[in-house]
Every structure is written in C-alpha cells, then in structure tokens.
Image: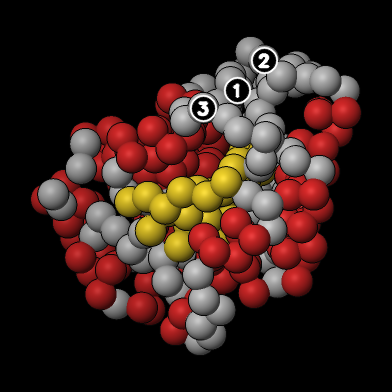
Amino acid sequence: MTEELKDLRKLILDIAYYGQDANLQSIFSSVEIINVLYSRILDITPQNMNASERDFFVLSKGQSTMGVLAILAKKGFFPIEELKGACQYDSIISMQADRTKVPGIEVSAGSLGHGFPIAVGVAWGNKLQKRSNQTYVLVGDGEMNEGTMWEAALFAGSEKLNNLTMIVDDNHSLKEMLDIGSFTQKLETFGFEVEDVDGHSEEALFQAFTKVRTEKPRAIVANTIRGYGSKTIMMDNTWFHRAPNKEELKKLKEEVDAFE
C-alpha cells in the first residue's frame, strides 16, 4: 500500500475520532476507488467544480462519505481544518454528504439506491445537451438489492449512456444475507460493458477506467475487502459502525502504517 493511501486512511480515522461516528469497514473498502478517481480520472477541481462541462461524481454508497470528504479536503475543495468539526453542531462535515454545505459534493447521500438513479439522470441530461463530460457513480454491493438500481440500469442500457460509469464496491457484504448471483452477468444483460477488477489495485482500476469507450454504459465491479488496510477493522465486524477512542485510534493508525 502506498504512503498516499495510508495517509488517506489515517485521515479518515481522525475524522471518525473527531465525530465519534463512522462506517470504517465500508469506507476502507472503497479508499483505492475514491483515490484513483480524484487523483487520475475525474475532471473536477476546486476551480471548475461549478462548470457545466466538468465531470460529475455521485456517491450513491453513502457509507463511504468520510472517504470522499477526506480526499476533497486533501484536494483543496475546503480547508482540511473543517474535518475536526465532524458531526458537531454547525459543522459542514456529517456522516452523510450534504451538497448544500460541502463544496465538491454533487448529490446529498441518503437511503441506499437513490444516488445511482440520479447519476443516470445526470448522464442522460449531459448526453442530450451533447456535452463530452463523464458521470461516475460509486455504489455498494448492498444497494444492488434495491429495485431502483435495476430500473435505472435498464434505462441506462436502453439509452446507451456511454458517458456513465458505475463502480460497484463489492466487498461481499450482501452475499452474507442474500446471494443474487453475478453482478457482471446481470449488468451485461441490462446493456452494460462490464469489467471485474481488484478494487485495491489502483493500476487495475485505472486501466478499467481508461479503456476505450464502446456505445454502452460502463460498469466496473471492484472486488474489495471490508476494512482493508487495518487487520483489526478487517477481522472485527463491530467496526461496521463504530468510532475509535483515543487508544484505539493510535493502534489503528499503527496497523495502517504497517499494512502491506
């Protein structure tokens, strides 16, 4: 794991400690996806974030909000000091992203299954206006049990929205409750070009993002591990929704530093 990815995970741990709330297993599984998007793929900067031709990133998987907030702060969308006010009264930083408060957030996070249909609408609108920009949307595997996801996917495939990329953070949480089969096969049936990748390999993700476009919407199924980057968070499912105390924060940061 690179020092950049370790620093990002340690910053996320700080936010969780400041706000005493977090979904650390879910956030850590998506760090590489979020980092490669904002570092190498998205045409979104603090300078152009309101331009009509910018790329759009929609976080449908709201449990990864703190990961997106961490990288937005590191990229200069807002002062990094704001993170210290996480989950406090009058702070812009909350467990779920709020587009009315946080620069760089396109869609407020909420109930699972809502962000992806919005992203499909954004991509469709941009295509109708003949814009060349791209829309990217990060979804969780748990969301794939929502009917709105498949209704939106059917529309995206039917309209051949080749300016849309869905990234499924498949950390295999859904399969512990319900096995709905192969995401790849289903999305291909719905008209998507689909690629399965190692979701913790930034190079594999980058190659998938930059493949030559077809006339279909793209889906990247990123195979990930809950809590990746910390042995404790990976092994103990209580970290699905839990924040560290001061002693735990120190231990978890040490684990991130030692992770290979």
In contact (CB < 8 Å): disc 2 and disc 1: yes
Distance from the alpha carbon under mark 3 to that under mark 1:
21 Å
Residue 94 lies, in percent from the top left, at 61, 52
Of residue 111 and residue 149, the one placed in the foreground of this image is 149
Q: Residue at x 73, y 49 (%)?
A: 157
Query: In the image, residue 186 lies at what x, y percent?
Result: 60, 65
Would you identify the image quadrant in which residue 172 lies?
A: bottom left
Residue 199 visible from this viewpoint:
yes
Dot 1 amino acid type? Ile
Name the mark on residue 244: none
Residue 241 lies, with reference to residue 37, above or below; the image says below
Residue displayed at 75% across by 41% down: 160
Residue named by callout 1: 44
Q: Is residue 239 left or right of residue 106?
A: left
Cα separation, mark 3 vs mark 2, equals 25 Å
Identify the residue at image location x=28%, y=68%. 234
